[in-house]
Amino acid sequence: MKPWSSGRMPNTLNSCGAVAPRLGHRLRRSAVRIDLRWRLRPERNGMPAYRPMLCMLLATALIGGAQPARTQTYPTQTITLQVAFAAGGIADVVARLVGQKLSQRLGHTVVVENRGGAGGNLAAKSVSGAAPDGHSILVTTTSLAVNETATRNKGFSAEDLRAIAIVAFSPDILAVHPSNPAKDLREFIKNPKSFTYGSAGVGTGPHIGAEYFFREVAKVQAVHVPFTGGAPAVAAGVGNHVDAVVLSLPTVVPAIRQGLLRGLGLASATRNSAVPDVPTYGEMGFPNVYSGSWVGFFAPAKTPDAVVAKLNVEINAIMREREAQQKLETVGFDVIIKNVAESKDYFRSEAARWGEMIRAIGYSSD
């Protein structure tokens, strides 16, 4: 017997917990003769062979539909922003600004946790191994791109992370203690045969940019003194424990405004409104010297696309607020708005650019 040959409709979904209505009598009354013969296997124990297949398809549809539902409920717990450097640095400044507003927008607690050390690698490694559910987020700087070439044995790769959003950029600045006799960058590098300079850590953008400038452009000897973040480096400069500091501009602006440090040169094509009296390297006779740091948010590589997209939208919405832009621009940041794909491409291009600089100076932190 072929299915439905008797004129009755089998209880197709019975074994799935539902029974299809009996429509055989309606079919018999139809003026149009419909061929209901199905080319399926014979019944087994009174159950059509296609019934298990329908059950399987139904279950698949239900399971597949559950994934978007779970994504829509994100977040489900506290979100931790792991900052790759100490409190007070540029990553920390941005993380705290975004964290506060992100908590309000998502309706969940957002905690900022500083995990400075190893040029930003400690926090990056921690987040790369975290659960890919969007509740552990890395806030880092150019150091992530730098370390792809400079530090090979770091226990993780940038491929273990995915970009959520690149949100801000700031140029590097060389600053000294007010008691330093040098009036500008030219005098500073001309007087001593060797000097010390502090940075936010080994492998950070300002560190590599400074090494490239001192070795390849200015041709002077400089001893690098790394710290675990921008704030400790500023403290060393204010205490006159190093001859100079090379840091991202926002880290140094407060000390310059208070007269605790004096800016000698900005590694930028133009002056910055946050420190209008500080000349660029180009003005001091060193054209085409550009070095700066961006701040970005990253998640574990396997974090769902929908979660990453949601975070990107929320973070960019925060960066579009005039209040946020004013706070960042006042201390020397340029706000950046990029979607997920653009942030990914930007990071890749930065990794390639810094890789060339690192190879030029023969630097390795391994």
Image (spheres, grey):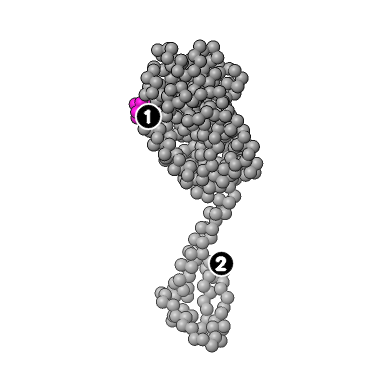
Q: Position of residue 294 (x, y in %)?
A: 50, 34
Instruction: Name the one closer to the observer, 244 or 165.
Output: 244
Specify whether 101 is left or right of 183: right
Q: Is residue 69 magenta?
A: no
Instruction: Name the one closer to the observer, 355 or 100.
Output: 355
Please name the amino acid that badge 1 sits on: Ile
In the rendered image, the residue lying farthest to the bottom is 31
Q: Position of residue 69 (x, y in %)?
A: 57, 54
Instruction: Name the one closer to the observer, 366 or 175.
Output: 175
Residue stretch rendered in magenta on the structure: 359-365
Q: In which quadrant is the C terminus drawn?
A: top left
> Residue at image x 45%, y 26%?
282
The residue that disc 2 covers is 17
Q: Secondary structure at mark 1?
A: helix
Instruction: Identify the image quadrant of residue 2.
Output: bottom left
Q: Cβ–Cβ below 8 Å for labels 2 and 1? A: no
The residue that disc 1 covers is 358
Seen in the picture, residue 279 relative to 191 is either above or below; the reply is: below
> Residue at image x 45%, y 18%?
186
